[in-house]
Amino acid sequence: MLFLSGCSYPEINPFGDEKGEYVDKGEGIESGLSPMIDPTTEPGVMPYQPFGNVLGNDWELVFSDEFNGEEVDLKKWNIDESTKTRGPRPRLGINSWFWKPENVYQKDCDLVLEVHKTGADVMTNGSINSSNKFMTKFGYLECRVKIGDASKLTHTAFWLQGPNMGNVNGTGADGAEIDIFESCHTHEQVQVNIHYDGYADAHRSQGWRYSTPGIHRDYQVWGLLWTDKYLKIYYNGILKHTFTDPKVIPLTHEFLWLSNGASFGEELPDNGFKAFELGKLTETRFDYVRVWRYNSIAPLQPWSNLVKNGGFDNNTSNWTCSPADKTAIDTSPNGAEEGKVYYRELTMSGNTMQLTTPDSEVELSQDVNVTPGKKYSFSFVGRIRDAIGKSEPGQNTTGKKLKGQIFSIDGSEAVSSEPICTVETQSSEDIFMSSLIPQHN
Ligand SMILES: [Ca+2]
Ligand SMILES: [Ca+2]
């Protein structure tokens, strides 16, 4: 089975009209008194862009915390303390759970959020938020984090809330909860969820699941690109989902939230909490959080993508497959392990194109108009799946290749005589491939 995931250059939408805005020490409070930029942040640091200058470089850092000091910076953060249980997870055997300040501290240049079992059905967690201290509207928000062990029934989250998100008016433009990620699964996926119009009967939400290779092994980088036209979610520099429905795009200031809590993935075992001993279960480590505002839309213009639906945004349109019927939008968790049961997503799927063939070649193609004499770059992100286990008897991906190639429009002449990008080894990671296309007269 071959596996192509979204190209990382599908940046066809320009930024919105408004520049980003921010408020430090909260709206209505005199601004400029509280420096929100960590002095240990590397000067001039830009959003994490391992796959090229996708987001441009015209960014102004307006907030950062590298968590390198001895203590949590209370000029920026409130340390949460729950006075009553947050939403119980009775199916998992967690009937109450609480954010506790004693679970929150800084160590080894990280913010640490510990997770404990403090009673037969009681969990404690850690959380900080920037309410009334730092609020932001539009821009790019990024964190680097090693999530808590999801198999210990905790999820880690990087999220935002607006002070007026409880206002019921049929839209989240006046404020929404944006969960950039919630690591509630033990397979390599997370959820983005957006909630608005409060949490009672009028509550509305939209959600999406996306693949996050490597999430359970090490630190990973999440980003949110937020304009007045869209929200884009990035994982390790790869675009994972785009929201364009105006109902889920806040047009007002929101504050940051970093937390862990009791989990809710459907694959987690019933009453699984019961098996754990009392004491510390796991911890989440945030390396940094940074927020930029954008100064102009100019940097993005050169990246207007010629490829249509390059991110496979929820469908296969604009692509031709040969032989036909060998494509699908991927709906399964990544990183299949032998003997393990996986749960198919019924209501949410990822923006990933899957090419299915155990035995023969499959080609996915699209015509692109180019101007003679100009140079173009070609790139894609993909992986050969089943790298860490067989999903079907007899299936073997050894010797499979994933490659990209450019042909003239009649399909007969290879513009690049050799494949531009080739992956031959199996991989459990997404791999980025890029090349300048040779000039063609
Ligand atoms: Ca509302
Ligand atoms: Ca750090």
Image (cartoon, rainbow, N blue to C red):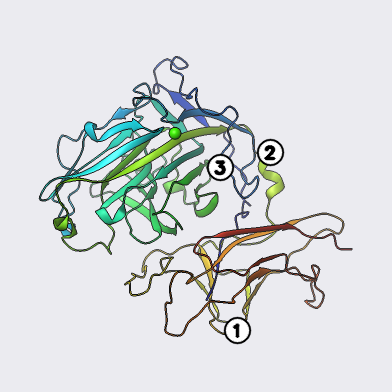
Disc on res. 298: 2
The residue identified by callout 1 is 360
Q: Give the foreground label among 2 and 1.
A: 1
Few, some or many C-alpha atoms within 10 Å of disc 3 (few <14, some 14-19, many ≥20)?
many
Q: CA distance from mark 3 to mark 2?
A: 19 Å
Q: Position of residue 279 (x, y in %)?
A: 17, 44
* Rendering quarter of residue 392: bottom left
Residue 198 higher or lower than 20, as above or below: below
Tell me the residue at 78%/60% (across/down).
437
Residue 160 higher or lower than 433, as above or below: above
Tell me the residue at 62%/79% (across/down).
362
Tell me the residue at 45%/56% (across/down).
214
Tell me the residue at 45%/23% (across/down).
36
In the rendered structure, which amino acid carries the disc numbered 3?
Tyr
Residue 157 visible in this rendered orientation of the protein: yes
Q: Give the position of the C terminus as an image quadrant.
A: bottom right
Q: Give the foreground label among 3 and 2.
A: 3
Q: Position of residue 292 (x, y in %)?
A: 53, 33
The residue identified by callout 3 is 48
Position of residue 327 in the picture relative to residue 200 (left or right): right
What SS does tag 2 mark?
Answer: helix
* Label 2 close to label 1 by CB (< 8 Å): no
Q: Residue furthest right?
A: 441
What SS does tag 3 mark?
Answer: loop
Of the numbered discs 1 and 3, the one sitting upstream in the chain is: 3
* Rendering quarter of residue 150: bottom left
Q: Position of residue 172 (x, y in %)?
A: 39, 43
In the rendered structure, which amino acid carries the disc numbered 1?
Ser
Position of residue 77 in the picture relative to residue 37 (left or right): left
In the rendered structure, which amino acid carries the disc numbered 2?
Ala
User: Where in the image, quadrant-wise, is ligand 2 located?
Assistant: top left
